[in-house]
Amino acid sequence: MRFKFLLLSVLIFFSIPAAAETNRDAVSSNELPAGDPFGEAEAIISSSSNAEDTIGEKADTVSSDILSGYLESRALLLHSAPKQEWLFQNANKLKLKLDKSFNRINFHSEINFSYYAGHTRLCLLEYLPQKQVKALSNLFGTNFSADVYNYNYNNRITVFRAYGVITLPRVSFFIGRQPVTCGTGYVWNPVDPVNKKDMLDPDYELPPLDALRVMLPLPAVKGELNCAYGFRNNFKDGEFLAFIRAHAWLDWHLVYAYYNYHKTDFLTGLTTSGKRSLIGAAFAGQAGEVGIHGEAAYHTGIKKKATAYFSWLAGFDYTFTFQNRIMAEFYRNDSGSKNSQQYTLQSWLSYINMEQGCLGKNYLYLSSTQILFDITELSLSALINLSDSSYCLMPQYKIMALDQLDILLRCMIMDGSKGSEFAAVNESGELRINFYF
């Protein structure tokens, strides 16, 4: 079976030694699998502080502007299983970033210009097993229309981020549309109820949140306290996130969240909304030369309107002297199903409409990345649903030709039994070019 071939391929790839040492310094084994939470926003404060050091004793009216961004062009080949054909899509994005600093006040804004060509209409029913499509058709009878499940890629201009940072001696305020994230996991973040990562592309940027955030440094524990109140639709229907980071051998993250949940009954069209609370903890650091990380979170419904559940993950990474980095991450989600026979039409529709991030209970992510000739990376990743034995194999080749240019070639190969999670996902190939300025 191809599932056994997958595991054999991953083991072989992990055991390949490098042909020769390269001149680039090996990636530090201290590198964590995920970036510093709130790091992008806080980097503005750091850059502002550096600017003040160079200014010295100049007048308080000094200000500076920085314009940057990137152009991203993606050529996608998508396989349509029902039509037995390959579809082409060209997705382009121009991101413009503007940073302006004025004394202790910093502003950051990002505007995305998105343009699509080729195949711009995706039918979500193609991600459903045929058994579930037939059940959906029989349920609605003559009123059933596949057009309801079409998703259109429309050209658009989006204010992706726009927020200000006020830096005072003992407190910083972040106001506006900003990134609000926490956790140490790479593919999953159980302690982060605000953002939902794409399992198949966890590195891609997450949507922002309109929020007011306060950051207080905690020098005694070498960390800080972050408190954020965010909202997506209106101010009253907001979400609260409190996050403490401390260092004691490992980096520890303690999280409390009060957030919204929405559950749509796709068979009746009714939507249930409510509040959940979350208590969680995460850690990241080193055990000798091995990087370790983990998260655990308990989700419970307010006033018992939603079922409580537990989720957690554990992972490690290690970098060899020949510049090969391996990483593994196991994820357990108690709200998922034990096997594909327990996947219902309702859970499938929630999954393809992105109301829930996954179908199963147990997942495993494996990856190996080899640096070649200083400017290229060859990697092989495998995402496995252990609950239904389906998987996605993702080989990737990246060229960092110039400081301003990245070229990425990747494909996704899916397999599994009928009715399993990844067997329903279309295989695809992608060429992604990013030019930074």
Image: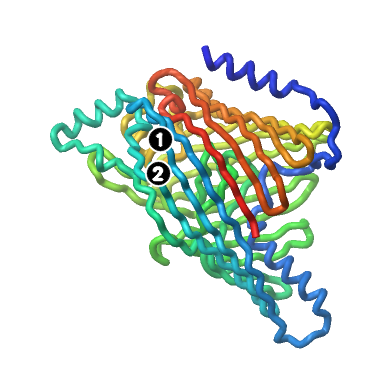
- Seen at 21% across and 38% down, the residue is 145
User: Image check: 229 left or right of 34?
Assistant: left
Mark 2 and mark 1 lie on one chain; the one further toward the N terminus is: 1
Q: Is residue 230 left or right of residue 315?
A: left
Question: Toward which corner of the image does residue 28 lie, by quadrant?
Answer: top right
Which amino acid is tagged 1?
Leu
Is residue 229 in view? no
Q: Position of residue 50 (x, y in %)?
A: 78, 70
Callout 2 secondary element: strand
> Which quarter of the rendering shows the C terminus?
bottom right
Question: Which residue is depicted at the point 70% across and 33% down?
Answer: 369
Residue 142 location (% of width, % of height): 13, 34
Residue at the image point whose x is 41% and y is 58% from the top = 156
170 versus 249 height, above or below: below
Which image quadrant for residue 317?
A: top right
Regarding mark 1 in the picture, which secondary structure is present there?
A: strand
Q: Along the line of sight, which residue is nearer the eye, 384 or 205? A: 205
Quadrant in the rendering for residue 410? top right
The Cα–Cα distance between marks 2 and 1, rounded to whole angstroms, is 8 Å
Label placed on residue 118:
2
Q: Specify how the rendered protein is coloured.
A: rainbow
Q: Considering depth in this image, is 321 or 309 the residue closer to the camera?
A: 321
Marking on residue 87? 1
Q: Can residue 84 be seen in this view?
A: yes
Residue type at mark 2?
A: Gly
Farthest-out residue, left: 142
Q: Name the residue located 79 percent from the left edge and 60 percent from the top edge.
A: 220
